Amino acid sequence: METIRIQTGRAYDVVISPGGLKDLGKFLGERQKECKICVVTDSHVAPLYLEKTQKTLEESGFAVTTFVFPAGEKSKNPTVLVELLEHLAEESLARTDLILALGGGVVGDLAGFAAAIYLRGIHFVQVPTTLLAMVDSSVGGKTAVDLKAGKNLCGAFWQPSFVLIDPDLLQTLPPEEYTCGMGEVIKYALLYDKELFQLLEQGKEETELVCVIASCIRHKQAAVEADEFDRGARQFLNLGHTFGHAVELASNYHLSHGAAVAVGMMAVANAAKKKGLFSEEETNRLAALLQQKGLPIRYDADRELVNAAIGRDKKKAGYRISLVVPRRIGYCELMPMTPEEAVEFYAVGGAF
């Protein structure tokens, strides 16, 4: 078991514990007085882990209610959010109670945003069940739902009170979802960690899974503690996301988030190579690693759709965005530019 303490405005522990789901009630009992817990999950995760989760919580003295919604990004919308809020009110959850997100990034985003706005804010706990959520979205407090205009445009920063990561839950994860998570793992390696990049190239991630997850969380910990509200150092975590979110939207979410990030990383790497900012050798290593892990390196998206999506990017400051550009494996830089300049930058690399 490994515990990482995240020192944000509200500090909390991230516990990485293989087989730890059975001890969830005990972990919470050490940190939380007995209360009512609403377990929020989706239709994929509920048949696998909802009963076990409810059992461990009730055995530790917590009262439990549940909310299950249809799995998929399309459920991360204001309608489902309001349904969850109505359920919380019907169950009379109070400010001393909490929400528990049991699932992947969609579950965490939806449940976390509900926690941020219900009764003007109640505590919530993250129990991620996907690799992507374990290495990225369960830590840092970004919560949101999607709007028709784009991904994550309605949300709040709301840190969890506790995060339990049980890598054993990945045993039931479909292969395509594991591959999706590898997109974010490679992002952290390209951003900060050439040793992690080499480990992934050697195919050792499955035997070193706890170490891989912990490495990603520690990198995110450093960024979040330095910049909780995404105005500076945390913007580096958007590597691959500006173009990735645009093609994710353009694909009508048929492209997974991890796959979209992979496409976004490759788009910015190719452009950086053409501009003489990133070597051809390392560009080829990135492409080879993404393909080795089953991730795409290109998606044919309409330039105008991508331009419009980037123009609505929630990370804009005024009329400029900060594009994260790799300079070498393990080191990137922020390059401010207008959305039009960003689209032209991608075009130089052959993204269109």
Image (spheres, helix red, strand yellow):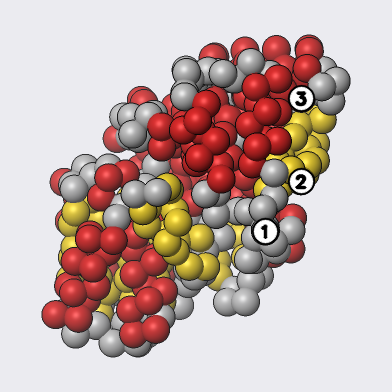
Mark 2 sits on what residue? 336
Under mark 1, the amino acid is Gly
Left of 46 or right of it: where is 255?
Answer: right
Q: Position of residue 19 (x, y in %)?
A: 38, 48
Between disc 2 and disc 3, the foreground one is 2
The tag earlier along the polypeptide, 2 or 3, is 3
The tag earlier along the polypeptide, 3 or 1, is 3
Query: In the image, is residue 274 above or below residue 268?
Result: above
Mark 1 sits on what residue? 318
Tell me which corner region of the image, top left, top right, bottom left or bottom right, holds residue 340.
top right
Q: Residue at x 45, y 77 (%)?
A: 31
Left of 189 or right of it: where is 90?
Answer: left
Disc 3, SS: helix
Under mark 3, the amino acid is Ala
Disc 1, SS: loop
Give residue 272's mark. Answer: 3
Closer to the camera, 335 or 319?
319
Query: In the image, is residue 218 above or below residue 88?
Result: above
Q: Residue furthest right?
A: 276
Q: Position of residue 110 (x, y in %)?
A: 34, 59
Q: Position of residue 292 (x, y in %)?
A: 54, 14
Under mark 2, the amino acid is Pro
Distance (Cα) linking label 3 and label 1: 24 Å
Query: In the image, is residue 249 above or below residue 166?
Result: above
Tell me which corner region of the image, top left, top right, bottom left or bottom right, holds residue 346.
top right
* Residue 314 visible in image: yes
Distance (Cα) linking label 1 and label 2: 11 Å
Between disc 3 and disc 1, the foreground one is 1
Query: In the image, is residue 128 above or below residue 192?
Result: below
